[in-house]
Amino acid sequence: MSLAPLRQADSLEKGRGQVGRNEGSAVVAGEQSCAEQLARFFPQAHAVSVPVQVTSHRGGAAHLQEATTVEFSSPRHAIFLSTLPLEFGDRVRLEARPQGYQAEASVDALQYHEGRKAVAVRFLQGVCDWVMKRS
């Protein structure tokens, strides 16, 4: 077996896509966002863009809130980026902005990537139609 030196134009297979070298710098093509990586585990999920207010029911009487966007959804799940201190099993309320539709949900999965956190929640009342609006 012989090893040939890697030329600058050669590319390497990586788990996140093609990495090629171009004059000393690495270029990554096909990089997936944190939400996209989590959506891979929910085959029925598709890309959407639904502005929501997320309210965490953790912490007793003081509920934490943030505005974010549902990026992927299925009839029973929604995936969004969050800075809230959420953990598996936590309960949250999603409220569509500005329409006001609401859904109670529980955290089913978390994905951390490059300092960001994607959250997948499961709707507690079953199918949630309003979050299925495609972008």
Image (cartoon, rainbow, N blue to C red):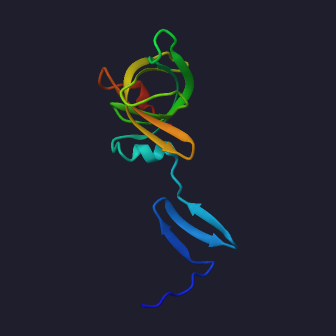
- Relative image position of residue 135 (x, y in whole percent): 51, 37
Total marks placed: 0
Q: Nearer the viewer, residue 126 or 16?
A: 16
Left-right relation of 8 to 77: right
- Relative image position of residue 54 (x, y in whole percent): 50, 22
Tell me if residue 11 comes above or below residue 71 in the rendering. below
Q: Nearer the viewer, residue 46 or 120?
A: 120
- Relative image position of residue 91 (x, y in whole percent): 39, 21
Question: Residue furthest toward the top?
Answer: 61
Residue in view at x 41 percent, y 41 percent = 46
Q: Nearer the viewer, residue 20 or 61?
A: 61
Question: Residue furthest toward the bottom?
Answer: 2
Tell me if residue 128 comes above or below residue 16 in the rendering. above
Quadrant position of the N terminus in the picture: bottom left
Left-right relation of 66 to 128: right
Q: Nearer the viewer, residue 88 or 128?
A: 88
Residue in view at x 29 percent, y 24 percent = 126
Residue in view at x 30 percent, y 20 percent = 125
- Relative image position of residue 117 (x, y in whole percent): 51, 38
